[in-house]
Image: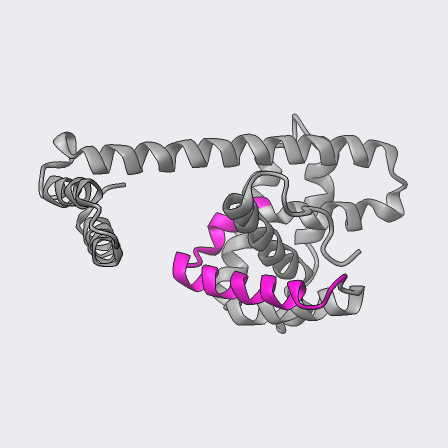
Amino acid sequence: MWDAELEHEVRIELEGFRAEVVGGDTALVSRIDSALRGLVQPSGDNQVAHVLVWRAAAKLLRRANRNHERVAELERALERAPRTKRRRLTLPIVGVASLAADIGDEEAAKAVAEYAFVLSTSGRPSRKHRDRAAARLAERLATDERRRSVRASLAGLAGLSADEFPLASLVLQELLAEPFPRDALKDEIWINLVVGLAHEQLEDALGEGSADRGDPRR
């Protein structure tokens, strides 16, 4: 996980943070300088690398646990729901494949910030307003490669989870069997995925449970 590119990015961030330190906080400056010096150490001895890698691993574990819980909740909901509602209930779960979209952190952050701003400035947004914000987010982040990668990841998930979550797996496979939309704005899988990504990032930034993870178009 730790490589020269990541080291360079961390160095730029630390140097930028050091430049912004105000009030003559010599202790903070000293800690930043110590971290900068530590970046040149081999990864095995690099304390900054250790901390960042462990944090990344912990975040991935939390994501995996959260996704497992979401699919389990979906399975229970599908058991109670009439067949006509299964598709609508399953669409939001595609957010579990957000990593497969391979959207850069900076690109995602800017798009999500715009999405959150649009929703926050509309008071209590109507369904039409939420739909427009979601469509704008989907269009901004969409590429055919990303949309196909997400479908491939979801297909793998459906196959792996078939024994534990048979209903969720079945409905997901039915969704994936639908024709691939040429227009990203008509791609419900992609729209639900990027909205799920947005809410996930907002939860990470503002605290667990601060954003509603339900169907964004209800």
**Residue 86, quarter of the rendered image:** top right
Q: How is the image coloured?
A: one colour
Residue 144: give x, y in percent of width and height.
51, 67
Q: Which of the two residues, 144 or 122, is positioned nearer the viewer here?
A: 122
| Residue 57 within the magenta-colored segment of the rendering | no
Q: Looking at the rendering, in which quadrant would you find the N terminus?
A: top left
Q: Looking at the rendering, in which quadrant would you find the C terminus?
A: bottom right
The answer to whether residue 201 shows anywhere in this view is: yes
Who's the residue at 55% across and 50% down the image?
202
Residue 156: give x, y in percent of width and height.
54, 42
Q: Which residue in the rendered view is the most extreme toward the front?
A: 23
Q: Which of the two residues, 86 or 13, is positioned nearer the viewer here?
A: 13
- In this rendering, would 61 be left or right of 70? left
User: From which residue to which does the magenta span run?
Assistant: 96-124
Magenta residues: mostly which secondary structure? helix
Who's the residue at 47% across and 60% down the image?
108
- In this rendering, would 57 be left or right of 98? left
Who's the residue at 80% across and 36% down the image?
78
Above-or-below relation of 142 to 165: below
**Residue 59, quarter of the rendered image:** top left
Q: Which of the two residues, 92 or 34, is positioned nearer the viewer here?
A: 34
Residue 89: give x, y in percent of width and height.
77, 46
Residue 185: give x, y in percent of width and height.
65, 71
Above-or-below relation of 214 to 217: above
Q: How many marks?
A: 0
**Residue 131, quarter of the rendered image:** bottom right
The answer to whether residue 154 shows anywhere in this view is: no
Who's the residue at 88% across and 48% down the image?
84
| Residue 111 within the magenta-colored segment of the rendering | yes
